[in-house]
Image (cartoon, rainbow, N blue to C red):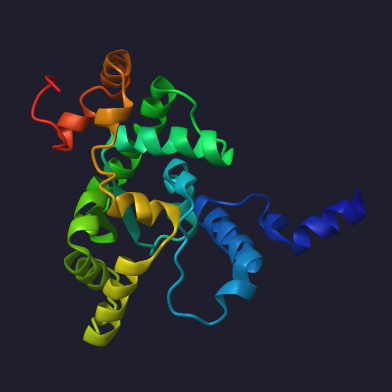
Amino acid sequence: MVEERERREEGLLGAGYIDRVGLGHACAQLYKSAVGSSVGDRRFFLEKTPLNTDFLDVIDLAFPASRILHLMRDGRDVACSMMTARRERGMSLPANVRDAAARWRRIERVISFGRQHPERYCEVRYEELVTDLRRQLERIFVFLDIPVVCSVLERMCEVGKNVKHPSAATAAAGFMGKWREAFSPEEVRVFKEGAGRLLLDLGYERDDRW
């Protein structure tokens, strides 16, 4: 018992408890130790795991100065993308429209975070990123406080045009609105039921007559 207590006093539990701030620091240190070899001494580090939308409270706790860049997309196209990725690549994603709609609605917590922390939140529409890459990149650079260098911006836009990975190829082929071909009338009904008013609130539709 004495040895166990001595070991505890050497670590985070030395004071008998960890408060919220201390827990945040501990989470941050654990994360930094896990990715340190990849990050090095870089000023910026981007973490783009999609499921981060479920853990914004933890991210906020560990990294209270972090900035949240939210890439938003029409939920119906998101549902198509998730189901296709599951079917063609075996990814652990929803297999049907009902579950896909429920998964997409999780972005409500990200939007809520943005309303509470507007100075740390930037919302970018996928559709605008595809159709006006340069302008959206400029917005992102300003938000992240990264100097906009024209030569770098031009190179990024050129790369964006020529990338050949599957998602870029489908976007270039007009993937926006793909749900119109993919959804059956029943799936349209199911998505409406599962998504609620979110499509309307985000401006993707004016009313329920779609």
Q: Nearer the viewer, residue 79 or 64?
A: 79
**Would residue 132 appear left or right of 55 to someone viewing this image?**
left
Give the quarter of the image for residue 6.
Answer: bottom right
Q: How many marks?
A: 0
- Tell me: residue 120, above or below residue 106: below
The residue lying furthest to the left in this view is 206
Residue 110 on image: x %, y %:
33, 44
At a point 48% along the width and 44% down the height, the residue shown is 51
Residue 188 on image: x %, y %:
27, 19
Give the quarter of the image for residue 163.
Answer: bottom left
Q: Nearer the viewer, residue 100 or 163?
A: 163
Q: Nearer the viewer, residue 52 or 92?
A: 92
- Tell me: residue 25, above or below residue 112: below
- Tell me: residue 37, above or below residue 49: below
- Tell me: residue 161, above or below residue 52: below
At a point 32% along the width and 20% down the height, the residue shown is 194
Q: Quadrant of the C terminus?
A: top left
Residue 87 on image: x %, y %:
53, 33
At a point 24% along the width and 56% down the height, the residue shown is 130
Residue 76 on image: x %, y %:
29, 32
At a point 42% along the width and 47% down the height, the residue shown is 56
**Would residue 3 appear left or right of 71 to someone viewing this image?**
right
The answer to whether residue 41 of the structure is visible from this angle is yes
**Would residue 50 appear left or right of 115 to someone viewing this image?**
right
The answer to whether residue 106 of the structure is visible from this angle is no
The residue lying furthest to the front in this view is 173
